[in-house]
Image: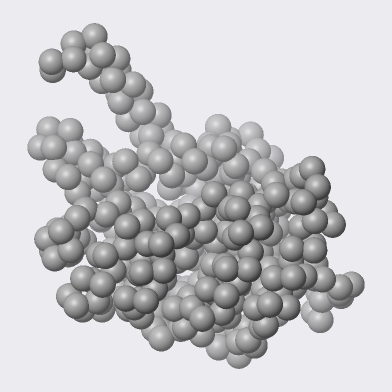
Amino acid sequence: MQNQSSFKSVNLLFGSACNLRCGYCLQQEEGEKMNKKGDSKGFASQFLSYLDRTNTKITSLHYWGGEPMLYWKIIKAVYEELQPVIQAKRNRITTNGTLITDEYVDFCNQHPDIFTVVSFHDGDISPEQWKIIGRLENFSIEALIHHKRVSPLLLKDDYERICELIGKRPPIGFDMIKANNGCHSNYWMTHEDVIAYFQAMMGIYELANFEQDLFCKTVIAHFLYRYQKELNYKGRKPNPCVNDRILSVDLFGNTYNCHHNNSPTNITGNIFKPYIPIKPISFNLAKFSNTKECQNCETYASCGGGCYTSNTHDADCLYYKLRESIAKVWLKNLEEHERIRKLRPNL
């Protein structure tokens, strides 16, 4: 490959098929979903040609469904074609975990660049299935905060049960629901929910520091990690999730505004051939990020105006503002603690 002129994180979209029907799923209505199966070898060769032609270096590759385990055969084939050439530092697969097999675990453990995110959500994962998942060497658990569950503590007992079952403590993190049109309004966060969430987080912070509760320490660590990570990219234009550093593409070369919407109306072009979208793009990517109110806000660097598809922008805004103020205090406390620890190592 030639000298690279750009660096991208790539979302590979394999389809919308899923074995679960979650009310908070961000994908759109059934009739709008992407379910055509692509060809792995045809995609890989064209994609590598595209990277060479555009002098693009891939920093990370994210494999998405639907449920990726329904596409595992073709995902594995694409990975085996691409990774030896692009050598991405991380290949990430986000799955609901219910269909993970021993074969998948063995393959991932043989390829340490593959990281699996198990979306806890409300999936009913059996103890036997958790034992299979627990064999993974590189994985984490993620769950959602939404109107029906505003406190991470509501999953503490389940997490501890899983840890005891698999004999390890994987990282666990919580993210706020994205209230787009695919997510049922019953899950949308209100102002009161956001306030209740941060009240719960304050209690979790106390338990992490004074009780040394391992679950709470993990939750706080993920909270601060996400805040610091988003400081690095959320202010990019025209949108934190849609910019020239992110490429969301399916196996036919169709590009999308973001990986959370596989609808044909979200197709923006094609990297393999000249293409005019069937329907005009109706999304205003800068709906919030270009407003003076957002750009003049001190939290803009860590939120970028929030999700352009959100139906609860005011609640999102409150979330980011409270997160900003709390994270700064906690990070300062952490720095002070580390400073004292170095001065007095026996503490």
In the displayed orientation, state which residue is furthest to the top: 343
Residue at the image point whose x is 89% and y is 72% from the top: 274
Q: Position of residue 330 (x, y in %)?
A: 32, 30
Q: Is residue 155 left or right of residue 239?
A: left
Residue 77 lies in quadrant: bottom right
Using the rendered image of the protein, determine whether residue 112 is visible from the camera's viewpoint.
yes
Q: Is residue 139 left or right of residue 286?
A: left
In this rendering, the answer to whether 101 lies above or below 290 is below
Residue at the image point whose x is 80% and y is 63% from the top: 49
Q: Position of residue 221 (x, y in %)?
A: 32, 41
The foreground one among 111 and 140 is 111
Residue 16 lies in quadrant: bottom right
Q: Is residue 340 left or right of residue 275?
A: left
Q: Position of residue 234 (x, y in %)?
A: 59, 44
Residue 138 lies in quadrant: bottom left
The tally of labels here is 0
Residue at the image point whose x is 21% and y is 53% from the top: 169
Using the rendered image of the protein, determine whether residue 28 is visible from the camera's viewpoint.
no
Q: Position of residue 87 (x, y in %)?
A: 60, 53
Residue at the image point whose x is 37% and y is 62% from the top: 109
In this rendering, the answer to whether 85 lies above or below 269 is above
The foreground one among 108 and 31 is 108
